[in-house]
Structure formats: structure tokens, C-alpha cells
């Protein structure tokens, strides 16, 4: 098979959401479409992906380096000789030629987004949902692809008006929709207001083990320690990103002071960064690691990050991909990880799962559409279809 | 004063150079021009900068986020109320609103390049070469701006043909031009060839203390240790980037095994990353730290990186900015740092210093042109002038 064209676009998400540190009013995402010369069921096989959300698009490196490099590569360089299908790992190796070491964030999103689109192609060529392809390749020996994965609803962003009332409505909506576990933002208000938010959600979900907090890197060390101490009695599921993602000493101090589980990793974009985080954070296994595949070089790098985590004594079920989209759902199921995030109703067409996915009793069923299955996510697929049409293939 | 327009462009450098890991055949740089409503000596005050070299341009984040944010900022937000002149630090604070924590490389080059262009404006508005402005602001109390700074010639890239003969010609050229210290690439050839390169240069510079090696992140741990042991007898000035910039454990192992000085930091793009490098590398002061101002958020961040270095027991003279251009020359002189790099004749119009700068006996004189003084670097100024003309101001 051959790649015949690649299109990308930067799409505004323009969300009114706000966490403890930033608002998302200018947020964008990069969408890519990778067209092949192959057809399945009468349709051209085109791979789609976007660079997750919460960070900005990566159109510059896509346009200036990585799309041209992928287009220049020959089928001989890209394809698995056994199947004739593109091999995403070969593609990443090619894309990373002529790249200096380190400074991953400058390129890892562009590379990861293209890698995910190539996995979409592999699934479509094989007629399998991506998680089944990934399970064949990456799941622990002896395990089978699951039928559903544990899944929690992320949200609880701060609102300008009626924050507590709207938070309650949102969480009730999640519980009605089949979620049992939720995560809310934390760290953006005075402590008494923070505790009021936590207690109002606990009254709905009934157990601390069903509520996680995301502090969005808001705290300096002493604030982080004070916050961790204040929430200790609630026995929450985890405390996420209490401080700067590179401040391993504060992570270590929080983990020493806090008897619960700390979480982090959505801002670590390579196995080297994950290794440093786990080594110097010294979590002793009490960590939930949250890599985001398209932000961090894609699924193959996620597999290496899981290996790094296991080597540091982190249980496979404590790797919980960030993202809340179909890509992280497939990654969670295919690599046998702990749980998937979901953002129903947030981040416009980029949030939530496809219409094939049902959430029941805290688990999400897995899709049957081949590849990632964005075709079953109508608003998002509209963006991809338009992008693909721009290629004129 | 008011910013009235900003232009940027991605310029190919297209160098035939090659270090131990990568070639530079696709390398680009981002150039920016920031036009103001002010005039000096009959000319509009326009600030210029580029994002150093060795990494790729950063046009995406410049165009999609940071130039629009800077253009939207009011003079009230940007200017120092005491002088009415733009204050680069205020600008950086504004540019970083709505940015998530961590993942610095994705934005630090775009922000740093704009910050340098704003410093160029400050120098031009005050009629002072930038290093004097920086010395007022950032130099240690009681010190005066120097008249010259220690300076070494970087180079010694691998060549496809006549590598050793051309290396000799290159180094003789540097010595004839007034340099006394040189740095060559290392780690790209078998050990015997590497030692032959080192010895051929030592025969010219006469002392190990005048030769530094740059391994460009080439080695895994055992290779790095073997290489460090092999070069120990030469007593070289430093061994630069023996391994991946994020592999602090290998840095530590090399520093423990190698009695000389290790160098690194051109791929660390924030004070947090420099702090981790120095903390976990445990160099005990035997480190030369090489931050690159436009790659790493600019001069104000460099000042913070110097503070971090001092707190870790690194002497101010062991901070040696990476870059080999007028920006790093001003930074070295203005902040009272140890030495400047120079790349005479390499990297096309982006390498080397302006015609005001004279190198003699291992020191570079400092320029008198206001600001950074790219106006006295004709080939590069041609690029900037064209960019500035595109603004139609």
C-alpha cells in the first residue's frame, strides 16, 4: 500500500472551560487525514487522528517537517513486508531521522498524531477495531482483548456562575449516563470552597474511591502539601498533578505526606520523561500514570512508557491514558491498562466517545468499527471528511 | 511606544554538516521582525531575532499563538511605566497566559525568539548595545560591563571526505583568526578514529585545556563511560552532551567516572529543566551549563537559569551560552558569564558575529551598534530587512 496524500488543519475548540491555572478560550486541535491507495467496502482507506485536547494544535511541525517526511517515504520503507500494510513503528523511526535528542514536546504531538492516523489505517486494512490490533501486538501474553474497559467521567471545570449548582447537575448527569466514577478540577478556589465542591460531589457518588481530583499543576510545594493534608480524610481515588509536571521533588514530598495515590503524566511526552518522573518522584507504586498517546509520539511510545512504568513497580492497571477520546479508549483496551477517561459533552466535537460505545456501571463497551472508528462520531467525522475531501483523492 | 506589526519567516539553513547523531540537511530557522511606532536616527525602530540554530524553526506557535497575543497586548500591558519602553519580561508573562505547565519545548523557542527581538528594541530605544542594557539589569552587583568576552570556535563537524585534513584546515583557520580554544564534534566514528581526530587537533592547539568535545547526545551509558575513560588522559576542556539530555543517571555516572568537566544544557529549555539536570546529575560544580537564550524563553529565563546554577554551586563562569551568534554574545557579556561560542563560516548567514566584533587571543570584542546589532551582519541583515519590508511599515 501507498500513502497518496496527507492533509492537516488547525481547528479552534474555543471552550469556555477553566481549570485552576488556565482558561481554554484559545485552545485549538490539529486534525490530520492520511489517504492511501487502498479501498475497503468501496471506500478509500483514510487514517484520521487529532492531537488530543487541552494543549494547542501542532500544525507548524506537521507542515514543515513531518508530513513532508512521511510523504517522501517509500512503501518499502514504511510497510510491514509480511502484510504490505504500513507499520506505524517504521514510520516513527523515519520521522525522527534528523531530529536532535531531547526537547520532545516540540515534535512529539505532530509525530504522535500521524502515528495514530497510521494505526487507524492498519485497523481499517485489517477490518478490525484498533484495540484488537493493539492487543495482538502489545497486550501481556495470555491476555485477551477485553469486551469493556473501566471508565470515568472527567470534568468539574470551574464556572463563572453557579459553580456548585452546575457541578452537581454535571455529576448527576454522569451518574445517570452510567458512570460511577468522576474526576473534578481542584486547586482554583480558596480551601473552604474547594472542600465544599468535594463534599458536594461525594454526596452524589457516595464513596471517596469514586472521586478523583485534578489540580492542573496549580500548587507550589507548601500549597500542595497543605492541600494534600486537607483532602486526606476523604480517601479519594487520586490527587492529580498537584504541582509543575517537572517538579519531581514536590511530587516526592506530596507522595511522602499523602497516604493516597498521586497521579500525573499527561505533560510527559516520552519514555525518558516518564522514567525520570517515576524515578525521582519515588512513589513506591502509589501513582497513577496518565500518558496521552497522540501527545507523546503515539501508541508505540505508550507501550514503551508502560514498560518503564512496570520496571518502576507501577501496576499495569495504574496506567490510565489521558485524553477522553476514542484514541485513548482503544489504547486502554488494547494495552490492557487500568481505565479510560471520558469527557462527555465537553470540548465540542472532540470530546466523548463514538455512538457505538455504551457506558454502563462504570465500564465502557468497545466499538466494532474498523480502526479508531471516528466514522461513528458524526460531528467529529464531519471535520475529518471535509479534511479528506480537501485532498481531492 | 507601540508595536505596530510583527513578521516571521522560516528560512532554510540547509547545511551539509553532520554531528554524531544527525545531519543538518533539512535544518531551518525562524526569523522575526517586530516593528514599533518609534524612530531613532531617522529609522523606524524594529527588533530582530532568530531562534538560534541546530533545531528547527518554530513558525507554527509563532503564527498561531504568540504573535497574535503580542499584537493584541496594549502598550499599557507591555511597557515599563517609568520609561515608556517595552519591557520584555511583561511581554513573556502575557505570552504565557493560557499556557499549560510543562512541555516547554513546544513554546519556549517561539517565546524566546520574540523576547530577544524585544530586547533588540530596548537596546535601540536606549541607544545602547544590548549587553550594556543587560549588564545594568542582570549583572552581579559591583561588576561593570566587560570590554571583551572569552570566546571559543565551535565546529569540527564530520565530513564525508578528507575529514581529518579538513578538520586540520578548519582549526588552523580558527587559530589564524585569533581564537585560542576550539570545540569539535565527537562520538560519530570508531574510537581509534575519534582519538586520531582529537590528537590531530591537540597538535595544533597545544593544550588539552584548549579543546572541548561535543558528543551531541550520541552515547548510551556504557559507551559514554568508555569514551570518557578513553579521553581522560588528554585533560580536555570539557566533554559535552555524552548522552540523551534527559538521561540524568548517565550524566551522573559519567561525572563520577570522569575527572574532567562535563557540559550540557543546550537542550534544556527552562529553569525547571536546568534545575533537574543539575540536581540529579550531581556534578559537584564540575559542569559547564550551556543554555541557549532564544531556545529557552529568552534572556530573562537565562537569568533565572543562572540563579538556579549558582544555587547548585555552579560558578558563573561555568555558564557558557550555546548559540554562537550575536544574541548569545550579548547574553554572555551582559550577564557576566564565562565564555561565548562562535561558529565562524558555518550555518550560512546565521553563523558568526557581526563585523564590529574582533577576535584576538581568545577574546571577542563587544559591538557598539544599538540593540543586538544584526545591522552590522550584512548577509543576515538582508534577510531581516526583507522581512521588515514585508510589514509595509
Image (cartoon, coloured by chain):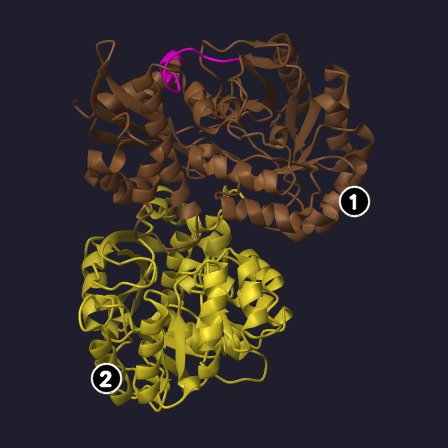
Chain colours: A brown, B yellow
Q: Is residue B320 visible?
A: no
Relative to A193, is A360 on the left or the right? left
Front residue of A388/A340: it is A340
Q: Mark 2: which secondary structure?
A: helix
Relative to A360, is B107 on the left or the right? left
Q: CA distance from mark 2 to mark 1?
A: 60 Å
Relative to B109, is A366 on the left or the right? right
Q: Residues within 10 Å of mark 1 (few under 14, many from 20)?
A: some
Q: Position of residue A325 (x, y in %)?
A: 48, 23
Whether residue B378 is situated above or below residue B79 in the rendered picture: below
Marks 2,1: beta carbons within 8 A: no
Which residue is tagged 2? B173
Q: Is residue B125 visible?
A: yes
Q: Residue at x 19, y 72 (%)?
A: B378
Q: Residue at x 59, y 34 (%)?
A: A19
Q: Mark 1: which secondary structure?
A: helix
Q: Residue at x 37, y 45 (%)?
A: B61
Q: Position of residue B66 (x, y in %)?
A: 39, 47
Q: Residue at x 77, y 30 (%)?
A: A195
Front residue of A50/B325: it is A50
Front residue of A338/A353: it is A338
Q: Which residues are magenta?
A: A365-376
Which residue is tagged 1? A257
Whether residue A136 is situated above or below residue A301 in the rendered picture: above
Marks 2 and 1 on same chain = no
Q: Position of residue B176 (x, y in %)?
A: 25, 89
* Residue A367 is a magenta residue: yes
Chain letter of the residue carrying label 2: B
- Residue placed furthest toward the right: A233
* Residue A110 is a magenta residue: no
Amino acid at each position: 500500500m501507498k500513502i497518496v496524500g496527507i492533509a492537516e488543519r488547525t481547528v479552534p475548540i474555543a471552550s469556555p472551560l477553566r481549570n485552576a491555572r488556565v482558561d481554554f478560550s484559545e485552545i485549538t486541535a490539529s486534525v490530520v487525514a492520511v489517504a492511501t491507495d487502498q479501498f475497503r467496502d468501496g471506500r478509500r482507506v483514510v487514517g484520521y487522528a487529532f492531537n488530543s485536547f487541552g494543549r494547542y494544535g501542532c500544525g507548524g511541525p506537521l507542515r514543515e517537517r513531518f508530513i513532508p517526511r512521511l510523504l517522501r517515504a517509500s512503501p518499502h520503507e514504511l510497510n510491514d513486508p509480511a502484510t504490505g500494510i504500513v507499520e506505524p513503528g517504521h514510520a516513527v523511526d523515519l520521522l525522527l531521522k534528523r531530529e536532535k535528542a531531547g526537547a520532545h514536546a516540540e515534535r512529539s504531538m505532530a509525530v504522535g498524531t500521524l502515528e495514530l492516523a497510521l494505526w487507524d489505517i492498519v485497523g481499517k486494512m485489517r477490518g478490525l477495531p484498533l484495540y484488537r490490533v493493539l492487543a495482538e501486538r502489545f497486550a501481556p501474553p495470555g491476555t485477551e482483548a477485553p469486551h469493556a474497559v473501566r471508565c470515568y467521567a472527567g470534568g468539574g471545570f470551574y464556572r463563572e456562575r453557579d459553580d456548585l449548582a452546575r457541578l452537581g447537575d454535571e455529576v448527576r448527569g454522569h451518574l445517570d449516563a452510567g458512570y460511577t466514577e468522576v474526576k473534578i478540577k481542584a486547586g482554583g478556589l480558596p480551601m473552604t470552597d474547594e472542600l465544599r465542591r468535594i463534599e458536594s460531589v461525594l454526596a452524589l457518588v457516595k464513596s471517596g474511591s469514586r472521586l478523583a481530583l485534578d489540580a492542573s499543576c496549580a500548587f507550589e510545594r507548601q500549597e500542595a502539601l497543605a492541600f494534600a493534608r486537607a483532602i486526606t480524610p476523604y480517601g479519594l481515588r487520586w490527587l492529580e498533578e498537584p504541582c509543575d509536571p517537572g517538579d519531581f521533588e514536590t511530587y516526592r514530598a506530596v507522595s511522602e505526606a499523602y497516604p493516597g495515590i498521586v497521579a500525573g503524566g499527561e505533560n510527559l511526552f516520552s519514555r525518558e520523561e516518564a522514567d525520570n518522573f517515576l524515578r525521582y518522584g519515588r512513589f513506591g507504586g502509589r501513582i497513577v500514570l496518565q500518558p496521552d498517546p497522540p501527545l507523546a509520539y503515539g501508541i508505540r511510545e505508550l507501550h514503551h512508557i508502560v514498560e518503564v512504568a512496570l520496571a518502576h513497580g507501577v501496576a499495569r492497571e495504574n496506567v490510565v491514558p489521558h485524553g477522553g477520546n476514542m484514541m485513548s479508549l482503544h489504547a486502554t483496551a488494547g494495552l490492557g491498562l487500568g481505565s479510560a477517561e471520558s469527557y462527555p459533552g465537553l470540548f465540542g466535537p472532540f470530546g466523548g466517545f463514538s455512538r457505538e460505545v455504551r457506558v454502563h456501571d462504570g465500564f465502557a463497551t468497545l466499538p466494532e468499527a474498523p480502526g479508531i472508528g471516528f466514522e461513528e462520531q458524526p460531528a467529529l467525522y464531519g471535520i475529518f471528511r471535509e479534511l479528506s475531501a480537501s485532498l481531492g483523492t
